[in-house]
Image (tube, rainbow, N blue to C red):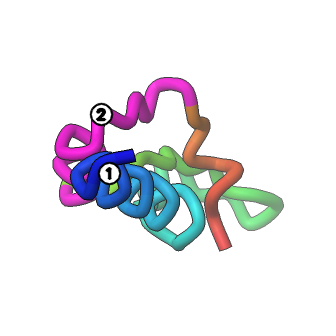
Amino acid sequence: MTDTEKLKAALRDAIINTNRIIKTRKTYDPAGSTYDIDWLDRVKEWAKLCDLDLDKYDPFYYTR
């Protein structure tokens, strides 16, 4: 594995294993509001750098 491949693998791991999402409230309801959850813009840029397809990962499962 080259150094570039190692760096890309490390960046992919960092993106998936840290809190890198944005949660925006769509509707308000005291019983339970609904939210849009998506990756931060900077994370989308990082993903391009390391060839990570974020479409394969649901950001909901990466909230903390």
Identify the residue position indicated by label 1 in the image: 8
In this view, the mark in front (1 or 2): 1
Q: Position of residue 6 (x, y in %)?
A: 37, 56
Q: Residue at x 38, y 36 (%)?
A: 52
Classed neighbour count for the residue bearing mark 1: other residues with Cα under 10 Å, few (<14), some (14–19), many (≥20): some
The label number, if any, that marks residue 51 in the structure image? 2
- Given residues 31 and 3, the one toward you in this image is 3
Classed neighbour count for the residue bearing mark 2: other residues with Cα under 10 Å, few (<14), some (14–19), many (≥20): few
The quadrant holding residue 31 is bottom right
Main secondary structure type of the part rendered in magenta: helix
Q: Amino acid at mark 1?
A: Lys
The quadrant holding residue 62 is bottom right
* Residue interval drawn in magenta: 42-56
In space, the residues marked 1 and 2 are separated at their CA atoms by 8 Å
Q: Is residue 36 magenta?
A: no
Q: Position of residue 30 (x, y in %)?
A: 74, 66
Tally of numbered tags: 2
- Given residues 49 and 26, the one toward you in this image is 49
Judge left or right: residue 8 versus residue 9: left
* Label 1 SS: helix
Q: Amino acid at mark 2?
A: Asp
Q: Residue at x 42, y 52 (%)?
A: 9
Q: Residue at x 55, y 50 (%)?
A: 35
